[in-house]
Image (cartoon, rainbow, N blue to C red):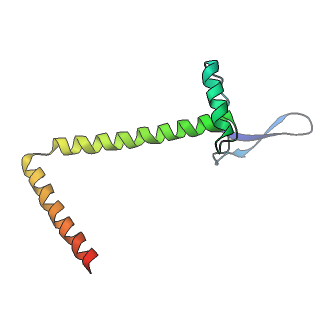
């Protein structure tokens, strides 16, 4: 559990309570190719990102979201690949019913 700390007059750390927002950040160190850093800096200048850190965090957040979407898509694909022929036929029938229902709703 992460805690928000503050320094009192005696310069000691005091536990203030659990952090529940996403405003807390963990500082990491990484080594990057200088050309890549230059590209990052150029991109920061022309983007909404206020800093390298924010840009990299946004990129990683987008990547993570894409990974989760891919995982769900793979699970859906595995589900449909696992269907028996009878189940596939039933799915096709339900699809036809859904299409007809949607047409009727749109025509009204």
Give coordinates of residue 15: x percent, y percent.
76, 41
Give the total number of marks visible in the rendering.
Answer: 0
Q: Which residue is rendered at x = 68% and y = 41% of the image? A: 24
Could you say which quadrant of the image residue 93 lies in? bottom left
Q: Is residue 72 left or right of residue 54?
A: left
Q: Is residue 37 left or right of residue 14?
A: left
Could you say which quadrant of the image residue 4 lies in? top right
Could you say which quadrant of the image residue 91 lies in? bottom left
Give coordinates of residue 44: x percent, y percent.
66, 37
Image quadrant containing the C terminus:
bottom left
Q: Which residue lies most toward the left here?
A: 86
Q: Which residue is rendered at x = 28% and y = 74% of the image? A: 106
Q: Which residue is rendered at x = 43% and y = 40% of the image? A: 66
Rendered view: 35 above or below 24? above
> Residue 99: in sight, yes or no?
yes
Rendered view: 42 above or below 85? above
Give coordinates of residue 39: x percent, y percent.
62, 28
Q: Which residue lies most toward the bottom here?
A: 108
Give coordinates of residue 83: x percent, y percent.
14, 45
Camera-side residue of 33 and 72: 33
> Residue 31: in sight, yes or no?
no
Q: Which residue is rendered at x = 30% and y = 40% of the image? A: 74
Camera-side residue of 60 and 40: 40
Image quadrant containing the N terminus:
top right
Q: Is residue 45 left or right of residue 60?
A: right
Q: Is residue 60 left or right of residue 7?
A: left
């Amino acid at each position: 559990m992460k805690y928000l700390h503050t320094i009192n007059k005696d310069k000691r750390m005091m536990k203030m309570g659990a952090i529940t927002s996403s405003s807390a950040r963990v500082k990491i160190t990484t080594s990057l190719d200088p050309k890549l850093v230059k590209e990052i800096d150029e991109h920061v200048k022309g983007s909404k990102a206020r800093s390298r850190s924010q840009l990299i965090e946004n990129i990683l957040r987008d990547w993570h979201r894409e990974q989760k979407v891919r995982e769900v898509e793979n699970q859906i694909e595995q589900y449909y690949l696992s269907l028996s022929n009878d189940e596939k036929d039933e799915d096709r029938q339900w699809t036809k019913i859904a299409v007809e229902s949607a047409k009727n709703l749109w025509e009204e």
